[in-house]
Image (cartoon, rainbow, N blue to C red):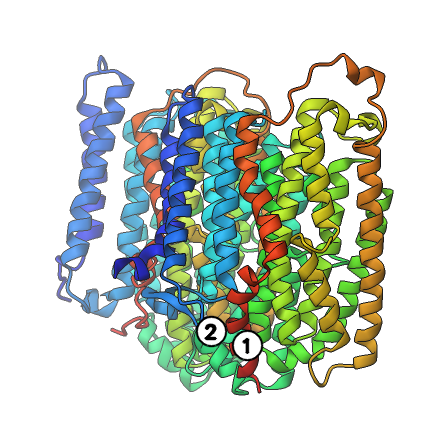
């Protein structure tokens, strides 16, 4: 059937073509551009869901594969496919972009033309979605870097006051990391015999011990720099607060919701299976950095006065949990990591939508200035904020819980051969982090939601959550609950794939 | 000596086209407007190039004439095709971007004469012919750079270019005369045999050194680069485009013939020198480009840095027959991809200069919003020059990385990667200037020929990712055929 072969590709190509078409629209037709954004990302989502219907959830390997010759000179091919690890992230990408397009129907940021904004978001979607389905290192790299230019412009043109600095910092930091990643890819290509960029082939070689340990460690260093900056792991995180804070709402949602996952996904898809021995050597270091990120992120959040910046720093901690799960190299840990990625994408995406909507009403972002009483002034908005914040701090029954708790569990019982004592220590640090996380979110809620409405806001008319927002948010709000009460939604998909690839190295 | 005119048809067509342009232009009555004269001259030029292109397309390989001094193989035909396409784009850019004071007859005559030399360079297998071809390509360019007669900087550009060009020609010729004395022949095949027999002879090494220094000037390799920024800045923008793409490639074509063919056996001596020149050239070009506020000067330093990247494959010669072929392919491919982006960028610059009168960053302010077409295209050209995927420049760099790593020169690949990161700073700086500030001034008027040039370049730069083999499979991996 054509769907099995082409659904993934179409979901990636449709936004690319759509971006071109939107760019050609006349500038005055703003509504048309926005509408096109919704339609195009909607069609892409539809293809993603079509792919979902053809996916066999009981299997662990790659499915819906398509492999076409691309650059014969160097043996790179257009090879795409999904397994249980990439499928949830792929669908999440298509969903979040669609919701962003819906959101901008009403809240189009100022700074440039609507058509340029829509075209860039669609271009971004191609890069993000493509990264999750690429099974060829060169193709992966092309999609990976395709994300940079549109995101740079989204921040630099539609961002807040400090946008130009934040945009260039994001761009250069990421490029710096990714060139080392590319060198790692090239090294893999030359060491593989026969030479290949094909991920499936490389995983087969890597897991059967084709690469010597010293070589693996060197390549891992290159990949680590690329992925760790993208995640971002402490101490490579300094671009994140600036970029997330300065970006327009939709930019922050996609940055936090999807872009960060490209880094963690890279670890799970490429680094772990292709370089199993190096992964074991590097895992303790990654675990330590992850634990530092958890505690450090939480402490930074406690010190933030800016609502958006607080959410940005909370990402550092949450991605720390994901990395902690990955660093355990165990079935539970990697499952928890993929779950954590999806949950963080849904929850933090939601939180950035909220930060944007709050800013649109109050025109300030400082928690102090908002001054409390939002539940009284804007009951729905306050309620949704409380819901999302509580989900983010990991309340059982909501989406944030499972990723973190299983990460900690995995750290108590990491893969054999890893230093048990160290990991138990990391688990304790992570547990402290969860307490701090609960602390800063609750404190934030107290300062924003509770108390009486400050005088300056009483007379000011503000709309509560409007219909467009409800439409854009409803899927996320439902998912937060659904993933929380029924985590098998994700674990059921990821587990066969994780089991398959962890079994490879044994 | 029997002369096979069919093998020489392409340069002959272009050269005679130049004469026809000059004659027709002088026959036109003075009442004919300058714009009309320009269209006539450009039309004849394009026709001559199309004819030459037809000859290139149907030439059989390998063919040779002039007693083996002129050889048509896949290498020379590829580069002849390249020069014709690049020349045609320069004609389009000139149509829309030349100042009104520039005499069209002289301009296109000089352009075609220079192109005649360029078409001969890659086919030359004899020192004498090579020298004549290189200088036929260079000499008209000295005058082209000074054609804006009322502009003092154009005169300065021309004079500086002329002096440097003469000095470099003298050094090159000096080295060639030694080489002739040492090998007893000007034929590159004989020289290659002699080099193979005695690759360590100090007399030979000195001769090689002088010849390569001469070419170092032509490709603006550090430390022989200082003329380029001043010349590009003072020359008319279409001429700067021509110099930075076609002249540079002609220099590299000559170097490639010598390095991959004639001097190949002595690579142990000169390859490390070329590697050093490559590293210094790319690093210095990139670092100095960071400080430029004039887009043409920025592009000049950028093209110095790019010359450093192009020297890298030459530094890999002598590490095995297989990698030699791949290095040559990588070089030829890189040149083509660089040319597309750089010609496109200069086409945009000349549109801006026509409209704004200047080429400083401030003249590009808000360009993206005034003319989204030019803005998007220029952004694509810059991003491609920086080597960021999915644009064409990435694939060019990728091929150089691959061959560098394959031949064991990993450190050269690492240096080039780091340089690419540095270059992003200044390429993005222009992009930032085009998109971020509010536009000052109205919509842009763009001549159709410039629009065509920009579209063609943008198509290559943006479309290559969809079908990379269209270009990547082109460069002949078979190394130069010997006569």
Residue A40 lies in what quarter of the image?
top left
In the visual, does B355 lie left or right of B11? right
Where, quadrant-wise, is the N terminus of chain A in this rendering?
A: bottom left
| Rendered position, B78 above or below A359 | below
- Residue B242 appears in the figure: no
Q: Position of residue A403 (x, y in %)?
A: 67, 61
- Residue A310 appears in the figure: yes
User: How dense is the environment of label 2, judged by Cα within 10 Å: few (below 14), some, or many (20 and up)?
Assistant: some
Tag 2 residue = A60
| Rendered position, B345 above or below A66 | above
**Could you tell me if the residues under marks 1 and 2 are in contact, i.e. CB atoms within 8 Å?**
yes
Disc number placed over residue A499 in the picture, else none: 1
Q: Element under label 1?
A: helix
Foreground residue among A258 and A337: A337
In the visual, does B336 lie left or right of B65? right
In the visual, does B360 lie left or right of B267? right
Where, quadrant-wise, is the C terminus of chain A in this rendering?
A: bottom right
Foreground residue among B210 and A82: A82
Name the residue: 59% across, 39% down: A251
| Rendered position, B121 above or below B265 | above
Name the residue: 80% across, 31% down: A366
Q: Element under label 2?
A: loop
For disc 2, the chain is A
């Amino acid at each position: 059937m054509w769907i099995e072969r082409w659904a993934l590709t179409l979901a990636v190509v449709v936004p690319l073509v759509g971006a071109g078409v939107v760019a050609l629209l006349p500038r005055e037709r703003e509504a048309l551009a926005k509408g096109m954004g919704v339609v195009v990302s909607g069609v892409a989502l539809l293809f993603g869901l079509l792919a979902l219907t053809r996916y066999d959830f009981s299997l662990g390997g790659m499915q819906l594969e398509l492999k076409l010759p691309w650059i014969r000179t160097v043996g790179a091919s257009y090879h795409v496919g999904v397994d249980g690890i990439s499928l949830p992230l792929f669908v999440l990408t298509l969903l979040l972009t669609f919701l962003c397009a819906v959101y901008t129907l009403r809240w189009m940021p100022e700074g440039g033309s609507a058509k340029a904004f829509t075209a860039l978001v669609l271009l971004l979607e191609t890069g993000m979605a493509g990264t999750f389905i690429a099974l060829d290192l060169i193709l992966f790299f092309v999609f990976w870097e395709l994300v940079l230019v549109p995101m740079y412009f989204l921040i630099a043109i539609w961002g807040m006051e400090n946008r130009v600095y934040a945009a260039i910092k994001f761009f250069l930091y990421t490029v710096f990391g990714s060139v080392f990643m590319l060198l790692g890819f090239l090294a893999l290509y030359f060491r593989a015999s026969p030479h290949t960029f094909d991920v499936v082939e490389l995983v087969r070689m890597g897991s059967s011990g084709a690469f010597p340990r010293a070589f693996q460690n060197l390549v891992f260093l290159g990949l680590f720099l690329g992925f760790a900056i993208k995640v971002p792991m402490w101490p490579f995180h300094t671009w994140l607060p600036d970029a997330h804070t300065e970006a327009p709402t939709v930019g922050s949602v996609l940055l936090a919701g999807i872009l960060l996952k490209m880094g963690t996904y890279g670890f799970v898809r490429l680094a772990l299976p292709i370089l199993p021995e190096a992964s074991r050597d590097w895992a303790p270091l990654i675990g330590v950095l992850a634990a530092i990120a958890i505690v450090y992120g939480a402490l930074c959040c406690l010190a933030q006065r800016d609502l958006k910046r607080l959410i940005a720093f909370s990402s550092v901690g949450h991605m720390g949990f994901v990395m902690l799960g990955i660093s355990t190299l165990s079935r539970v840990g990697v499952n928890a990591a993929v779950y954590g990625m999806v949950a963080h994408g849904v929850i933090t995406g939601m939180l950035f939508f909220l930060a944007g909507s709050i800013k649109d009403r109050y025109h300030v972002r400082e928690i102090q200035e908002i001054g409390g009483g939002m539940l009284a002034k804007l009951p729905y908005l306050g309620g949704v904020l409380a819901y999302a914040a509580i989900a983010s701090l990991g309340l059982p029954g909501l989406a944030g819980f499972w990723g973190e708790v299983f990460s900690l569990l995995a750290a108590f019982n990491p893969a054999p051969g890893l230093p048990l004592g160290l990991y138990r220590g990391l688990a304790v640090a992570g547990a402290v982090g969860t307490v701090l996380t609960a602390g800063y979110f609750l404190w934030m809620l107290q300062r924003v939601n509770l108390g009486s409405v400050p005088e300056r806001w009483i007379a000011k008319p503000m709309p509560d959550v409007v219909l467009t927002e409800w439409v854009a948010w409803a899927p996320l709000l439902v998912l937060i609950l659904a993933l929380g009460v029924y985590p098998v939604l994700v674990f059921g998909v990821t587990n066969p794939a994780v089991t398959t690839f962890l079994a490879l190295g044994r | 000596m029997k002369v096979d005119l069919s093998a020489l048809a392409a340069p002959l067509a272009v050269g005679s086209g130049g004469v026809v342009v000059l004659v027709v232009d002088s026959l036109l009555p003075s009442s004919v407007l300058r714009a009309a004269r320009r269209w006539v001259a450009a039309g004849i030029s394009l026709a001559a190039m199309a004819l030459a292109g037809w000859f290139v397309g149907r030439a059989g390989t390998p063919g040779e004439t002039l007693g083996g001094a002129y050889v048509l193989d896949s290498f020379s035909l590829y580069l002849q095709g390249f020069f014709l396409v690049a020349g045609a784009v320069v004609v389009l850019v000139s149509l829309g971007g030349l100042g009104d004071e520039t005499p069209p007859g002289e301009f296109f005559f000089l352009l075609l004469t220079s192109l005649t030399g360029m078409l001969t360079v890659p086919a030359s297998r004899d020192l004498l012919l090579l020298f004549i071809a290189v200088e036929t390509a260079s000499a008209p360019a000295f005058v082209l750079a000074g054609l804006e007669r009322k502009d003092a900087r154009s005169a300065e550009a021309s004079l500086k270019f002329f002096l440097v060009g003469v000095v470099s020609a003298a050094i090159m010729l000096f080295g060639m005369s030694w080489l002739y004395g040492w090998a007893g022949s000007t034929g590159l095949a004989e020289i290659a045999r002699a080099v193979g027999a005695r690759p360590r002879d100090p007399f030979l090494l000195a001769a090689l050194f002088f010849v390569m220094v001469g070419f170092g000037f032509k490709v603006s390799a550090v430390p022989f680069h200082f003329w380029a920024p001043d010349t590009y800045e003072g020359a008319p923008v279409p001429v700067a485009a021509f110099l930075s793409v076609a002249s540079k490639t002609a220099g590299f074509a000559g170097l490639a013939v010598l390095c991959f063919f004639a001097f190949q056996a002595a690579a142990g001596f000169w390859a490390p020198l070329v590697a050093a020149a490559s590293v210094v050239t790319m690093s210095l070009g990139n670092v100095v480009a960071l400080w430029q506020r004039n887009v043409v000067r920025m592009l000049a330093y950028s093209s110095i840095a790019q010359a450093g990247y192009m020297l890298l494959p030459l530094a890999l010669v002598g590490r095995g027959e297989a990698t030699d072929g791949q290095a040559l392919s990588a070089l030829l491919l890189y040149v083509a991809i660089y040319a597309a982006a750089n010609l496109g960028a200069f086409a945009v610059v000349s549109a801006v200069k026509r409209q704004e009168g200047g080429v400083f960053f401030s003249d590009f302010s808000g360009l993206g919003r005034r003319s989204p077409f030019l803005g998007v295209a220029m952004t694509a050209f810059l991003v491609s020059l920086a080597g960021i995927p999915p644009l064409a420049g990435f694939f060019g760099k990728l091929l150089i990385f691959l061959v560098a790593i394959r031949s064991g020169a990993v450190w050269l690949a690492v240096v080039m990667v780091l340089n690419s990161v540095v270059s992003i700073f200044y390429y993005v700086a222009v992009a930032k200037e085009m998109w971020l500030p509010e536009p000052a001034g109205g919509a842009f008027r763009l001549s159709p020929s410039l629009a065509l040039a920009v579209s063609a370049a943008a198509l290559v730069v943006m479309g290559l990712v969809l079908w990379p083999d269209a270009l990547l499979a082109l460069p002949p991996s078979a190394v130069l055929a010997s006569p």
